[in-house]
Image (spheres, rainbow, N blue to C red):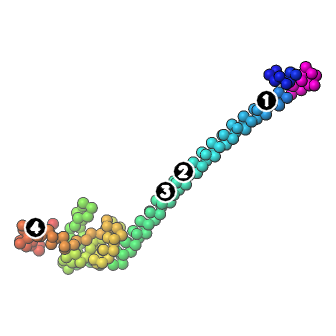
Amino acid sequence: MNNPFQEQFLKAGLVNKQQVQKANQKKKKSSSNQQQRSKKAAADEQARLKARKAEQAKTERDRALNKHKQEQAQKKAISIEINNLISDNLLKRDEKCDIAYNFEHRNKVNRIYVNADMKSQVVQGKLGIARIEGRYELVPLSIAQKIQQRNEKRVILFETEQSQESSENDPYADYQIPDDLTW
């Protein structure tokens, strides 16, 4: 017995051994219950922290996913709008369009068949070439500029101002290129 009061009560005959043992058991139970409660409280707190962190991580992932979905939806809407602009304003080409006009787009040489009038307008910069569903179509300059504002990769514009600037330093500027020369 560790408690001097218990020993004194036993000697005085106020309590018996069973009562002392019962008191010790209650004391041990209460201390072990307190330890268990404190351990349980600590474990609960850790579980809450983990749950909060997991919830925050999930929220961040959801935000990123929603942002990505919104960007994709916006790109799709712009693409549909561009397709509508091209299909509504394209210049019809028929069997009379037998001149192959070659142009570069995305580091590839592509070909579109046009007539002489269309070719001269493209060269002068009055028409643009726009890509729709894997093919190329001719569109007026104003439509081509609208498309270029939305997506530069979908349109090809030939500006005459660039050729004038380069002709100032060009030693062959005085020589005229024959009309029948095409590449």
- Which comes before the other along the chain, label 2 or label 3? 2
What secondary structure is the stretch in magenta mostly built from? helix
Residue 163 horizontal side relative to residue 152, left or right: left
| Whether residue 167 can be seen here | yes
Compared across the picture, whether 177 is left or right of 52 comes to left
Label 2 crowding class (10 Å Cα cut-off): few <14, some 14-19, many 20+? Answer: few
Residue type of the residue flagged with mark 2 = Ala
* Disc marking residue 57: 2
Q: Earlier in the sequence, mark 1 or mark 3?
A: 1
Q: Which of these two is toward me, 72 or 56?
A: 56
- Whole-Å distance between the Cαs marked 4 and 1? 101 Å
Of callouts 3 and 4, the N-terminal one: 3
Measure the C-alpha gap from mark 2 to mark 1. 43 Å
The front one of 23 and 97 is: 23
Distance from Cα at disc 1 to Cα at disc 3: 53 Å
Whichever of callouts 4 and 2 sits on the residue coming sooner in the sequence is 2
Residue 19 picture location, percent across and down? 89, 26
Residue at 66% x, 40% y is 43
Q: Nearer the viewer, mark 4 or mark 1?
A: 1
Q: Which residues are magenta?
A: 9-22
> Can you tell which quarter of the image residue 29 is in?
top right
Identify residue for label 3.
64
The residue beneath circle 1 is 28
Alpha carbons under labels 3 and 4: distance apart: 51 Å
Q: Are marks 4 and 1 in contact (CB under 8 Å)?
A: no
Q: Quadrant of residue 136?
A: bottom left
Q: Is 21 in the magenta?
A: yes
What's the residue type where badge 4 is placed? Answer: Asn
Q: Circle 4 sits on which residue?
A: 169
